Amino acid sequence: MKLQSYLMGEWREGQGEGVPVRDASTGEVLARVTAEGLPVKEAVAWGREVGGKALLALGFQERGRRLRALAQYLSERKEALYRLYATTGGTRRDAWYDVDGGIGVLYAYSSLARNLPEGNLLPEDDFLPLSKDLSFQGRHVLAPKGGITVQINAFNFPVWGLLEKFAPAFLAGVPTLAKPATPTAHVAEALVRTMLESGLLPEGSLQLLVGSVGDLFDALDHRDSVFFTGSKATADRLRRHPAFLERGALFNAEADSLNPAILGEKATEEELSRLAQEIAQELVIKTGQRCTAIRRVFAPRERLKALLEATRKRLEALRLGDPREEGVDLGPLASLEQKAEVEKAVAALLEAGARVYWRHPGREDGAFFPPTLLLAEDPWPGALHQVEPFGPVATFFPYGSREEAARLAALGGGSLVATLATSDPEEARFYLLALAPYVGRLHLLNARTAASSTGQGSPLPRLLHGGPGRGGGGGEAGGPPPARRPPAAGP
Ligand code: NAP
């Protein structure tokens, strides 16, 4: 069966055989993906014209109400998505992060609409006097740019990834053309079918392209944007397209990252234990396939072993298996290709001087990859901070002073998020300042925050999600409320 794209108001099938999408646990071919011969450039023009007009006819308030209604509609039908999710290797808890997390973003943006005016224009500031008698004044106003937003998503969050880009675009009055990653495109296709069946989305406000974008970028100009989530390598290739360099379309990237976690010098034993819990959780959720997962752990030299042991203890009793089986804590990676990528990354880290401290004795067949803790006694080789194993792998490093820890964390070249375990305000202030140029979000973990913290790995629609440098340099569309977001980052 070939997956279909929804372009110009119709479900359409690409030509040719396409590439297979497989069940992560069994390897069974579930569907094939091809966009060959699809009218992608025409879909851009159609989206601008038809979708743009239809969205502006609604205004912020009605669009906000529809986002809420859509969230409710999807909530009532999420079991079907949960069932499909197991084919990606995700457990029910993983599905919850993706499906319910995505629905939560719809609710969050619907609530934000309450702070917006009627209509489609959003004043950014008050009137600015430009003449002595105030008869001539100026004001900055945000307005829809009249273009389309092409949303390219990574394979690991087929639901949340699509909804967290769609929601702000819809609220802003910008039509979406979503392009899911091939390995989990069947989940995104099912989601879009349900969204369209709801009858809540005006014609042209949401299109879906399953498969390669082909020459779509050739149709983009200064009115349009591409919101990309995926690896740095792909982001770097795409951002060089003339659509961005010559015609002024916006390219916003949210890329990969080697997120650090630091055990503060002043951290208590309880904070050490909480950090171990956090690291273990980051390796287990989505089998470590989250861009925000903890990849590098820094601890004072004399406490590193204790942190490694505490993390290992939390991981060793877990069960790897097909997520459809009872009692499974973590599933396989999304595909054999992903497993090959993780194996390659671990080999590069070992080559750079890390060693395997502990490896879970669970399954290694098919796309299964067991949780692995690496230890780098010499923390300085650059490659240890540059290679991202996109799976259940974290590397532990010793540090001698907080200045050293901050310098090591910075070697990641820019990260989406960092965790600091401490309750010492002075230590927290030091890292806030030292890491500000390198990290998008700083998650403070201590006895006070732990009870209600959603953890390092969960981007929240009310906070900026994005990171400098290697993190892509963009702010995810699902960032802070429109009025507080830098204009360049908006859809
Ligand atoms: P990827 O290989 O870079 O692909 C990302 C998306 O780009 C996919 O939809 C892919 O489509 C598409 N793509 C690839 N080549 C393209 C081209 N020439 N033109 C247009 N689109 C193209 O990344 P991935 O393997 O899906 O995801 C894993 C990576 O994403 C990890 O490095 C992870 O850190 C990062 N990630 C980051 C975030 C974040 O929020 N920062 C979130 C999730 C994942 P096809 O699949 O059809 O090739």
Image: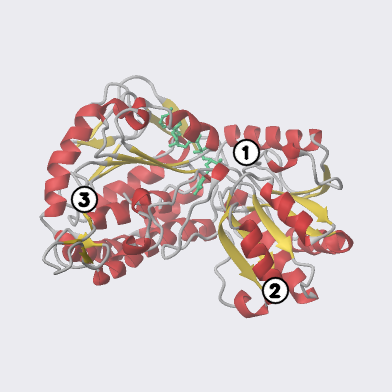
Foreground: disc 2 or disc 3 = 2
The structure residue drawn at horizontal position 50% and vertical position 32%, both measured from the top left corner, is 236
> Which mark is drawn over residue 367?
1
Could you give the CA–CA distance between mark 2 and mark 1, rounded to whole angstroms?
A: 45 Å
Q: Is residue 434 left or right of residue 49?
A: right
Name the spot of residue 242 as percent of width and height, x first: 35, 26
Q: Return the disc, 2 or 3, that comes first in the chain's sequence.
A: 3
Toward which corner of the image does residue 142 lie, by quadrant? Answer: bottom left
Pointer 2 local density, CA inside 10 Å: few below 14, some 14–19, many at least 20:
few
Disc 3 from disc 1: Cα separation: 44 Å
Labels 3 and 1: the sequence-earlier one: 3
Under circle 2, the secondary element is: helix
Q: Is residue 462 visible?
A: yes
**Residue 328 visible somewhere in the drawing:** no
The residue to which callout 2 is attached is: 426
Residue 341: x and y in percent read: 63, 34
Residue named by callout 3: 144
- Between circles 2 and 1, the one closer to the viewer is 2
Q: Where does the N terminus fall, quadrant-wise?
A: top left
- Disc 2 or 1, which lies upstream in sequence? 1
User: Which of pointers 3 and 1 indicates the residue nearer the eye?
Assistant: 3
- Secondary element under disc 3, as helix, strand or loop, is loop
Identity of the residue drawn at 67% across and 63% down:
431
**Residues at marks 2 and 3, CA–CA distance in whole angstroms:** 44 Å
